[in-house]
Structure formats: C-alpha cells, structure tokens
Amino acid sequence: MNLVRIDGLHKHFGSNHVLKGIDLRIKQGEVVALIGRSGSGKSTLLRSINGLESFEDGLVEVDGERLHAGQTNLRELRQKVGMVFQQFNLFPHLSVGENVMLAPQVVKKTPRGECETIARSVLDKVGLSEKYDAYPDQLSGGQQQRVAIARALAMQPRVLLCDEITSALDPELVNEVLAVVKTLAAEGMTLIMVTHEMRFAREVGDRLVFMHEGRIHESGTPAELFAHPKTPELANFIGSIN
Amino acid sequence: MNDISTWDVARNLADGAMWTLGLSLCAFVLGGVSGLALLFARIAKRTWLRRLAQGYIEVFQGTPLLMQLFIIFFGSSLIGIELSPWLAAALGLTLFTSAYLGEIWRACVESVAKGQWEASASLALSHFEQMRYVILPQARRIAIAPTVGFSVQVVKGTAVTSIIGFVELTKTGSMLANATYKPFLVFGLVALGYFILCYPLSAFSRRLERNSRESRTH
Amino acid sequence: MAYSFDFAAVLEYREVLLAGTLRTLALTATGTVFGLAIGVLGAVSRAWRIAPYDKVFAVYVEAVRNTPFLVQLFFIFFGLPSLGVQINEWQAAILAMVINLGAYTTEIIRAGIEATPRGQIEAAQSLAMTRAQIFRQVVLPPALRKVWPAICSQVVIVMLGSSVCSQIAAEELTFAANFIQSRNFRAFETYFIVTAMYFVLALLVRQIMIRGGRRLLGGRRA
C-alpha cells in the first residue's frame, strides 16, 4: 500500500520552473533517497511533502491526508509528517526535553506526564536521555541533530523527511546521526531523505530517486542505479561524486 | 479673548516653533562639540579621565532632564549668576546632548574592528594618528545614522525647557490653550509642529541605517 | 555673602518624598506592563504584516516617537476633556506612559521578532503548530530575551521622563520636589536631593527589570 503519493507536482520560483510534474509513490516502511545536483529540485520536492513549499499544480497525499495546490490547512498532514533540517533548528530557549515535548503538548494536547514519558523514550532511542535538561547550545552539532530527530519522532509521524541532515556537521559527527537513521530504517520507519552521503544512501536506501532539472530522471534500487545508469546525466552525476 | 482666530494660533505657534528649532540647533551643535571632547576623554589612556567622562555620562543619562534644568536654573542663582530661561535651557540641553552623543560615538568607535587598531599600530602610527587616520573616519560613517536619530530626542527634549519658562513651541501652546479654551486644537497643532520638525530626521536616520546595513551585507 | 546649604530642610519632608517615589514607581510599573502588552501586539502586527493593524501601528509609532512626551501629556489631559472625555491627572499620566512605552516597545520587540531565523518557524510548522502557537512558543520568548536590555533602557528613559507629569499636578516625585521647595524655599537642595533619588531609582529599576527578565524569560546565562 502506498503511504505517500505525489501526482503531477509543478512548482515555480518566479519564472523558474523548479518542479516539472513529479509523480512518486512511496510504500509504508520504504527508505527513499533523493539524489541529484544542487538546484535539481530535490529539496523543494521534499519540502512540498509537508507543505513548507507551496505548489501550483498537482497533489500530495500522505496516509489519506490530501494536499492540493494552494491549500493552506496543513495541520492534519503535518501531524503525520516529521521533518529534520540541515541546520537542526532546535528552539534555543527550550531545554532538550522541552524541545521534544512542545509539539505533543500544544498541538496534540497530550497531558504533561505522558509527554514526559514520550520525550524520555524518544531521547533514549537517539541515545541522549541523559541530556534531557541540557540546552541546545550546550550540545555538539551531532547531538543537536539527534535531538531534532527525537523531536520529530515525538509526534509519532508516519513518515520522516530528512533534508541534508548531515551537511552542516563536522565529519567526525556524521556517523552518530547516520547510525540513528539506520536504526529507524531497520525498525520500519518510512524515510524520505535528501542526502549527499552516497555511500549511506546506497547502504540504507531501498530506492534511489535521481532528480535532474526538476524531473525524476531515473529511479530504482541502489544496485541497479549505480551499476547500470540508463542516462548520461546519472552516469555523469555518479562519476562526479566518486 | 475669544477673537483669537485659528490663523492667529497657527502663526504664534510657528513663532514658537522657530525658538524650538533655534534651541535644538544650538544644543545640538554645542552638545556635539562637547560630546566630541567627552568621546576623547572616554577613550583616553588616562584612567581618571575615562572615569570622569563615564561618571558625567551616567549622571546625565540617569537623571531627568527636568531636574537637570532645575538644578542649573536654581544652582546658578546660588553662585550669583542670574541665567535667563533661554541660557539655562541652552546650557541644560547642551550638557544633556553631549552626554548622549559622547556615549553613542564611543560605541561607534568601539565597533570598529580590533584588527584596524592592530594593523595601524603595526604600521607604527601613534595613538593620535591611529584615531585621526584610521579609526575615526570609519567610526564617523557608522555614527551618522544614530546621531541623526538622536537629534530627534534633542528636538523633543526642548519641550521640557518650557517648564523653566522658556517660551518655545510647547510654552506658546500652553499659553494659547489658556487664552482660547481650545486645548484639543492647540495641542494638536503643537504636536503637529513637533512632528514636522522630527519626522524628516527620523525618516532620514532610518534610511541611513538601512543603507549602511545593506552596504555591510554586500 | 556665602550661601549655607541646608539639606536637613529637605529631609524634614521625607514622607512626601517617599510618597512621591512610590507614585513614580507605580506609574512606571503600570506603564511598563500595559506598554509591553501593546508592544507585543504592535510588534507582531508590524513584523508579520497583519493587515490592517500593521498600518495602524505604523502610524501610532511614528506619531508617538516624533512628538514630545510633555505634549502628549497635555494633549491627553487638557485636550480629551474638551471632547467630553473626563480624565483626572493620574489617568492622564498613566495613559500617556502606556501610549509612550507601547510605541517604543513596538519597535524594539519588532526588531527581535524579525531576527528570528527562518528555520525556527519552519521547524515549528513541521510540528503542525498553528501561527498563534508558533508566535507564543517559538518566536516571542527568544525575541523578548534578545531585546530585553533595550526594553530595560527604554523603561528607565520613560521613568525619568515621567518627571514632567508634575506639570499636570500628578503627585509623583517631581511634584513632591516642587511642593517641598515652595515650603522650605530651598530649591537647590531640594532638587539636588530629588535628582539623586532619581539616579538611584534608575539604577534600581534597571536591576529589577534585568533580574525580572532573567526569571520570566528563563535566561539561564548572560
């Protein structure tokens, strides 16, 4: 069964046509990596899935919540779609625990005690339960990003969007974040990620989606795509990153 | 009494506004000169000079302008000098202005990058030469917007001098309000008069600030 | 003829001074609380361009910032009754303080709101928070914390400015000074002592504001 369905998505930035009719189906539990050069539209596509980018034409559907062009009521959809950002975007005035509890508390109106239980369990999952009372600026980049993952998980999303979540990290901190993502994938979380970590994408991804100039150029299993690129653009892209 | 027309009111207020403008200019120019002296004292090498300047600034920024005017007005008569309201007002506002400008300018000097001091020192410039050729020219550019912005405070500050009897825009307004029994109209016009004096300065300062922000990001 | 200072002649009136001090503080506290409330509303209207309030607040801010407090006070105290609005000196003084601080804090807080990184808002949106929730939970607390020093300075400036409320016979600290010097004929000593009192009050109010801000806004470290 398809958890995420994207039909005929078109998006412009001014006169720049950045998404030129995207169709994509993603199954429950699938791990999809969007790859491609910068400017190919992969981040924009990812951000359209939870309505951070509006689009002019097409449809996004996640677990039965439909999002049409120009629609602004995104609350139901966003409760089912978690997102992790390149720059972490933790709330600096809140402790780690408060960062994680905020949305369950104010959006879902979950009682405080229950929120704490949730917070402790998701922080445990990312290996940071001892940082519950710390503040974001006391954590390393890798720890901050793991808290950001925990914050998204606390809403119990059906799908998690990861937008270049290791790009802002020092090289030695990348692995701790990727390890968390790998665990999530193994537990059956549906993941859609934009990433430059090709080795990771090959290892964890069930499917790679290669985007080029606003279109899905090629997609398939990592093995297929890397061994037998069908188009010169993909061959080129693979060549440029190796 | 009641045959004072709106036209008379406006004309009298315009006269008052001229005094407001004159006092503002006077305080701003004299306050600027003494503010500059204060700036040099504030960043001097001698500790006592710095402390003195800092104390001066803290006293004038930490007490009401009205109290400063009262003390000048009554204090001068104690030492046998009878200051006219005009002189007391000009003196009081000048001291007040110098304290604020001195502090604003000090912040501008300190915002010049440390590397500029080090670079100019390593070229064997003296402290004075560093200031004269490297630091002040840069600080001056940064200082223009907040200085123009502060000029609005000077114009508004002149209103307080009406209380020690200097007849400027506000005092003229009070007298006219009493004479015409039309306080709403008169004080509305007084406010408009200040707005006409201040708004261009506010708008200009804002534009300078925006320009300097943009030139910094490019 | 040497003048002999007589500061004791002022201290005889310490109860009058104390009453004036308390009233000046009350005026400042009321102005601060309501002024901040207006400032927050004005700031969000301006920063997020909430029509038509953004325009209304823009006009309000310009009108207040480009006219003297004393004239605003006279306009309220002498002008409003001629429109049939009955207002006593205290109501006028408080209203003028609130209006004044509301305008200045609108601009100060707006700068704080506009400095919110875009990612903060996107993260909150991704968590399905509403606009109001995002403002209240994510945008406002760090914005207020960032601009709190500027707010403290403004409150001190307005408190010192409230000295002119004596002109409409609001019995605050300057009014007390005027009263005392009219009785003891020791104008210089009286104003000297009251000026010193304002100086101490300014330090005190700033400290209270900074500490209060640290507690309310949860600033852990400087």
Image (cartoon, grey):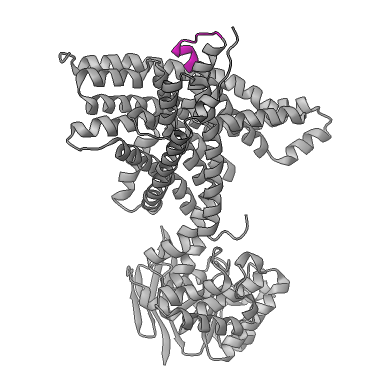
Q: Nearer the viewer, residue C133 or A51?
A: C133
Identify the residue at image location x=51%, y=88%: A30
Magenta region: which residues?
A: B80-90
Residue C76 position within the rendered picture, expressed as x and y whole percent measured from the top left:
28, 34
Q: Nearer the viewer, residue B199 or C84?
A: C84
Residue C41 position within the rendered picture, expressed as x and y whole percent measured from the top left:
36, 52
Image quadrant assignment for residue A232: bottom right
The answer to whether any part of residue A237 appears in the image is yes
Identify the residue at image location x=47%, y=83%: A114
Left or right: residue B25 compared with residue B112: left
Image quadrant assignment for residue B175: top left
Quadrant the C terminus of chain A occupies: bottom right
Left or right: residue C194 compared with residue C52: right
Q: Nearer the viewer, residue B61 or A119?
A: B61
Please determine whether, in this image, residue B119 is positioned above or below residue A131: above
Please determine whether, in this image, residue C82 is positioned above or below residue C98: above
Quadrant the N terminus of chain A occupies: bottom left
Left or right: residue B128 compared with residue B31: right
Image quadrant assignment for residue C102: top left
The answer to whether any part of residue A213 appears in the image is no
Identify the residue at image location x=49%, y=26%: B67
Q: Nearer the viewer, residue A143 or B44?
A: B44
Residue that lies at the very extreme toward the bottom in this rendered image? A1
Please determine whether, in this image, residue A240 is positioned above or below residue A202: above
Residue B32 position within the rendered picture, expressed as x and y whole percent measured from the top left:
57, 22
